[in-house]
Image (cartoon, rainbow, N blue to C red):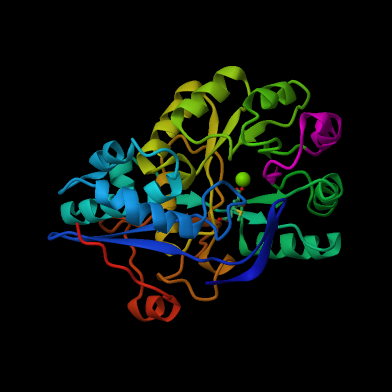
Amino acid sequence: MPLVTPFQTSFGTETRRDVLLLRVVTPEAEGWGECVAMSAPLYSAEYVDGAADVLRRFLIPALPAHADAHAVGRALRPFKGHRMAKTALEAAVLDAGLRAAGLSLGSFLGASADRVSAGVSIGIVDSIPELLDVVAGYLEEGYVRIKLKIKPGWDVAPVRAVRERFGLDVPLQVDANAAYTLADAGHLARLDEFGLLLIEQPLADDDIVQHARLATRLTTPICLDESIESAEHAAAAISLGACSVVNIKPGRVGGYLEARRIHDLCRAHGVAAWCGGMLETGIGRAANVALAALPGFSLPGDLSGSRRYFTTDITPPFELRDGHLTVPTGPGIGVEPIPEILDEVTTAIEWIPL
Ligand code: SMG
Ligand code: MG
């Protein structure tokens, strides 16, 4: 699915999403799950063809008959890694089970809100005037928080320009996708004067200890994304002082149940949390919006309207209302692909009987 605009991060540029969707069919109901792995292993080790392979060869065959989402987790635990693939499978099984039970994902997870505030993540662009136009457009649409992707050479100047043009009141944060090292601490401290909500994943994925060192050098709160692949990682990072905010992405941590565990942990420790995004279609977005409605999601997520990503989404589009997205209330994730639209973008289908 082509993106409406190329999305550049410190590790590369996405111009389309090659989406792997899982559809689980049981005698009672059907369920959908989206795999958020990108085409290439640049955000993390996973990539979409690898996810399809591990699902086909290992994960799906390991499922017990009549598995619920908890049983899926137990069955998949022996297989290391591949959390995005596992999440898609868990989500699809969970969706089918909840549809059969007539319960929404939000109610199942413990959502306490009927809408969630919408943030937008803005990629690296060619010039500061172009960036200011993009930010202005999103603020006009009602986004309540702006996130700027940064990398060495595109950090202090764009942040300063956005602050100068839009003022200190706009909730603003940055995401480096692991582009810096601890040697850059002095440079990153130059961001302190701009009153950012947080700096996301400044250092490498496996540098949790270094993030704790960096935290002593910055007043900008550190948020971890790539470093946190489980509740155990989150607990370690919090107790080391490596972050004071956590980006919770179900795909990165192996599922919605693990995402909820991290939410509970953050809440118990008074650590701020928000729901991350991976350029999802309406399928993954619906589930993320339900998750983000839990009470511990204290900051706006990377949850934007469908048209920020795709001209035509495969589900009825999510739309901003007064800076918020509405939590679906129907059974399961509450949305389904529109068959004709799904057909148009489908490049391959594979059925795997259990
Ligand atoms: O879904 O709105 C979205 C994108 C949010 O910036 C976003 N995601 O590191 O947080 C992140 C990135 C990962 C995806 S980059 C292709
Ligand atoms: Mg990130």
Residue 205 in sight from this viewpoint: yes
Residue 126 found in image quarter: bottom right
Residue 204 found in image quarter: top right
* Residue beneath the point at 49% across and 38% down: 297
Question: Is 277 inside the magenta-drawn segment?
Answer: no
Q: Position of residue 307 (x, y in %)?
A: 55, 69
Q: Nearer the viewer, residue 303 or 84?
A: 84
Q: Position of residue 254 (x, y in %)?
A: 41, 42
Q: Nearer the viewer, residue 217 or 206?
A: 206
Left-right relation of 276 to 206? left
Q: Position of residue 192 (x, y in %)?
A: 80, 33
- State whether residue 23 is above or below residue 211: below
**What is the span of residues highlighted in magenta in the rendered image?**
171-194
Q: How many marks?
A: 0
- State whether residue 19 is above or below residue 95: below
* Residue beneath the point at 29% across and 52% down: 60
Q: Position of residue 294 (x, y in %)?
A: 41, 40
Left-right relation of 234 to 122? left
Residue 56 found in image quarter: bottom left
